[in-house]
Amino acid sequence: MVFATLGEAGFGIVSVLVAGGVGAAVAALSARSTIRRREARTRQAERRAADAVRLAELGSMTSGLAHEIKNPLSTIALHAQLLREDVLDSAMKDDERERVSRRVDSLAQECTRLKDILEDFLRFAGRVKLDPHQLDLRDVVLDLADFFEPQCGQAGVLLRKDLAPAPVMARVDPGLLKQALLNLALNAVQAMKDPSPGSAPSELILRLESGPDGIIIHVIDTGPGIAPERRAEVFQPYVTSKPGGSGLGLAVARRIVEEHGGRIELHSEPGRGSDFAVHLPLAAG
């Protein structure tokens, strides 16, 4: 009855009112959604800040403890070396001298391994302070390849370089970035240590590419690959499948890359190898 008396003008007014109400409701929903996203980002930033404070406190405490352990460990290693010299100069029978020397050598090797673990831990737990320079990342990759190629040769791994044809400029700490890439390369070579009989020669590929969205440095191996259920944990501290490994190499690499404003993505297929892709921002300007 009401609508029958409104006429066309009345219907127009009702339509405007309905449309206005719908528009206001949509705007309110959009505003609430924006507010929720902002609140979520704020909470996430607060959690990151709190985590950073806790990590700084933990890093300070554990770094001090690690330094305290390193001092007596160095003393033990020095005395192991002196003891070995005394054993070699002693009047022991040859078989006894050899047996004692092997034990002393084992002691020295374990001291060295513990020292390496402590140094990895200090790099992971300590504060990462960048000394960035704007440079061509091709030079960083070439320096790493020149340094690491002999070790690849000893492991029977062919090292290949695939670099961008033009300069790839970025603002990085060259020493720390090379350390991160070296950790990834070491992990790759260790993964290819025991190839199956009759398989093709193992390869390590260092690939550098640049695009409008940033820079990618690939560290690719032709090893056994990583099972899907293990990919989420490989960057966690003290997670390792290698005998004698510290489990900190990949964690340190990720931390260094993240300090540069980048990230590491893992692409792997069991039986076909792995690709650790280091994403870095382009140099400003």
Image (cartoon, rainbow, N blue to C red):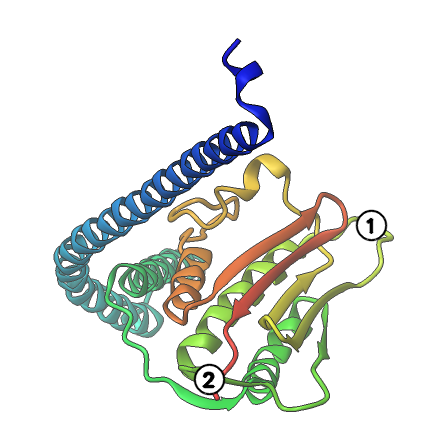
Q: Is residue 127 visible?
A: yes
* Residue marked by disc 2: 284
Q: Earlier in the sequence, mark 1 or mark 2?
A: 1
Kind of residue at disc 2: Ala
Residue found farthest to the right: 198
Who is closer to the viewer here, 60 or 149? 60
* Residue at figure coordinates x 35%, y 38% from the top left: 32
Q: Is residue 47 left or right of residue 10?
A: left
User: Could you tell me if the residues under marks 1 and 2 are in contact, i.e. CB atoms within 8 Å?
Assistant: no
- Count of all numbered marks drawn on residues in the image: 2
Q: For the residue labelled by badge 1, is the local secondary structure a helix, a strand or a loop?
A: loop
* Residue marked by disc 1: 197
* Residue at figure coordinates x 48%, y 61% from the top left: 263
* Residue at figure coordinates x 16%, y 64% from the top left: 67
Quarter of the rendering containing residue 72: bottom left
- Residue 196, x across and y down, in percent: 78, 48
* Residue at figure coordinates x 55%, y 59% from the top left: 187
